[in-house]
Image: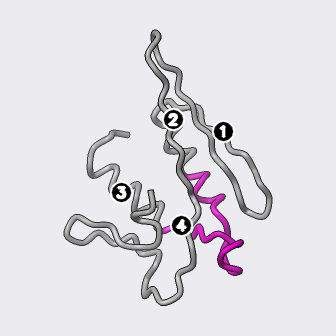
Amino acid sequence: MTGSREHVLEFLQQLVRIDSRNPGLDPDGPGERDVALRVQEWLRSFGWDPRLHELGDRRANLVATRRGRGGAPSLMLNVHLDTVGVAGMADPFSGALRDGRVYGRGAQDT
């Protein structure tokens, strides 16, 4: 895998296509576990050590580390994997790419 612009856009599209609605915000929401599993797989491909923390009912957190070299400072990214409801959205999980933009629920959350 590469870190090219095309690769990153494709990965974003894959994530948008996974329904990750938070069941605490949307009763029909399946939770973010499937997104966490996909991100876990992607991070592993780049040499990270991602660890899934099951929270029950298809909910999960993901913590990933990658050892650095020398005494450089650490970097921490803190993001959420769940999304909110999709009421009123025509195609919330399309992940469509139009004019360089990805469309769908969660495409611009983090």
The reply to whether the magenta stretch includes residue 29 is yes
Q: Which quadrant of the structure image shows residue 58?
A: bottom right
Q: Is 94 above or below relative to 68?
A: below
User: Residue 8, image x and y in percent?
Assistant: 34, 50
Marked residue nearer the N-terminal end (4 or 1): 4
**Marks 2 and 3, how far apart at CA:** 24 Å
Q: Is 16 above or below relative to 46?
A: below
**Marks 1 and 3, how far apart at CA:** 23 Å
Which mark is drawn over residue 51? Answer: 1
Instruction: Classify mark 2: residues with Cα within 10 Å, few (<14), some (14-19) or many (20+).
Output: few
Check contact, mark 4 vs mark 1: CB within 8 A: no
User: Residue 91, image x and y in percent?
Assistant: 43, 83
Q: Circle 2 sits on which residue?
A: 76
Q: Nearer the viewer, residue 95 or 55?
A: 55
Q: Tag 2's secondary structure?
A: loop
Amino acid residing under circle 2: Met
Amino acid residing under circle 1: Arg
User: Which residues make up the magenta segment?
Assistant: 17-38
Marked residue nearer the N-terminal end (2 or 4): 4
The reply to whether the magenta stretch includes residue 48 is no
Which mark is drawn over residue 18? Answer: 4
